Amino acid sequence: MSALFNFQSLLLVILLLICTCTYVRGQFPYIVDRNKQGFLGLFWKAARIGERLSPYVSLACIVMAVSQIY
């Protein structure tokens, strides 16, 4: 089943996108910061969400990991 039709998989994909974009922006900020508009601006926005809501994103990743195990 596609991640678009399964809500839990969709949340997992969104969390992984946020975490990946935040990590890439921390390591290579010039890659993410040069694309602030358009379709690639989605990655910049995901990185900003990961930076500003870091405790909540971390908690959501832990909850998602536990739910995947059980």
Image (tube, rainbow, N blue to C red):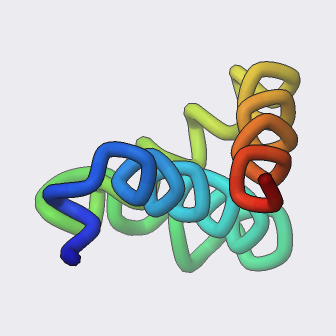
Q: Nearer the viewer, residue 57 or 31?
A: 57
Task: Examine the rendering and report whether any part of residue 1 can be seen.
Answer: yes
Q: Nearer the viewer, residue 30 or 6?
A: 6
Depicted 8 relative to depicted 31: above or below? above
Q: Which quadrant holds the N terminus?
A: bottom left
Please give the name of the residue rendered at 55% of the width and 78% of the height, measured from the top-left corner.
31
Please give the name of the residue rendered at 30% of the width and 54% of the height, measured from the top-left corner.
42
Residue 70: x and y in percent read 78, 53
Depicted 52 relative to depicted 9: above or below? above
Residue 12: x and y in percent read 52, 56
Please give the name of the residue rendered at 15% of the width and 57% of the height, measured from the top-left corner.
5
Left or right of 58? Residue 51 is left
Please give the name of the residue rendered at 71% of the width and 58% of the height, measured from the top-left corner.
68
Picture quarter containing residue 25? Answer: bottom right
Q: Nearer the viewer, residue 3 or 45?
A: 3
Residue 49: x and y in percent read 57, 32
Left or right of 23? Residue 19 is left
Task: Examine the rendering and report whether any part of residue 51 can be seen.
Answer: no
